[in-house]
């Protein structure tokens, strides 16, 4: 039973004269929750407009900045917009204005450009893996993670609600530490802290 159906039944029981105590036992809710659902039934929450409204010219400039950054695959936050346009308003006002302009603050996932040859090689490798009948008891899973000083690799940006988020993977050159780990068939975990530039010979030596 979804929330709307439960609200409808609560209102129906209330109109029939059922007490709050009995309804709380039936639906497994507290009396205050039952009372709140009765009082809020049928009410629609109005979207609050920003207290300080930005001019039409500023809103157009904000939209052009977001469109330019989305084409260049560059993230665009409310702080970036405020600094680029020198807007004399708070960040909350900028965010509320963008939401009124049908923009959302979305997380842009990584998009790797794969050629047709790379896709074919991946499919061929997967088919060969299953056709050879390799037992998972002989498979080792490994991966590495780079922890950089510039912060997280998340990529949030303002986009239109109907716009599909996308970006190109950006490699940020920053100081950090790389940890390589390996899970063996017996469940044991082995790890290595990798120093300096890495190449295939380094991975082979670690294994």
Image (spheres, grey):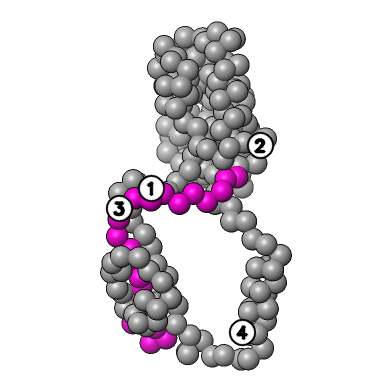
Location of residue 81 in the rendering, given as x and y in whole percent from the top left corner: 48, 24
| In the depicted structure, whether residue 93 falls above or below residue 137 | above
Disc 4 from disc 2: Cα separation: 38 Å
Residue at mark 1: 152
In the image, the segment drawn in magenta is 166-188
Give the tally of numbered discs: 4
Packing grade of label 3 (10 A; few <14, some 14-19, many >=20) is: few
**C-beta proximity under 8 Å, tags 2 and 3:** no
Location of residue 192 in the rendering, given as x and y in whole percent from the top left corner: 29, 73
Residue at mark 3: 175
**C-beta proximity under 8 Å, tags 1 and 4:** no
Residue at mark 2: 163
Which is nearer the eye, 156 or 150? 150
Q: Kindly identify the residue that appears in the image at 66 percent across and 74 percent down.
A: 121
Q: Is residue 115 magenta?
A: no
Give SS at disc 4: helix
Disc 4 from disc 3: Cα separation: 37 Å
Determine if residue 47 is in view: no
Give SS at disc 3: loop
* 100 relative position to 124: left or right: left
Location of residue 172 in the rendering, given as x and y in whole percent from the top left corner: 41, 49
Give SS at disc 1: loop
Q: Which mark, residue 129? A: 4
Disc 3 from disc 1: Cα separation: 13 Å
């Amino acid at each position: 039973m979804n929330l709307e159906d439960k609200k409808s039944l609560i209102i129906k029981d209330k109109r029939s004269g059922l007490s709050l105590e009995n309804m709380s036992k039936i639906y497994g809710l507290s009396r205050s929750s039952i009372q709140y659902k009765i009082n809020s039934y049928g009410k629609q929450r109005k979207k609050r407009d920003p207290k300080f409204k930005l001019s039409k010219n500023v809103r157009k400039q904000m939209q052009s900045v977001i469109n330019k950054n989305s084409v260049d695959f560059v993230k665009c936050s409310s702080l970036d917009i405020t600094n680029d346009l020198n807007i004399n308003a708070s960040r909350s006002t900028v965010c509320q204005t963008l939401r009124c302009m049908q923009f959302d603050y979305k997380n842009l996932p990584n998009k790797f450009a794969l050629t047709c040859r790379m896709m074919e090689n991946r499919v061929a490798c997967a088919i060969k893996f299953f056709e050879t009948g390799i037992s998972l008891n002989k498979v080792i899973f490994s991966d590495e993670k780079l922890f950089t000083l510039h912060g997280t690799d998340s990529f949030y940006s303002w986009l239109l609600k109907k716009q599909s988020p996308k970006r190109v993977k950006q490699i940020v050159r920053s100081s950090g530490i790389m940890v390589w780990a390996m899970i063996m068939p017996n469940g044991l975990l082995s790890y290595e802290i990798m120093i300096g530039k890495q190449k295939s010979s380094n991975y082979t030596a670690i294994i």
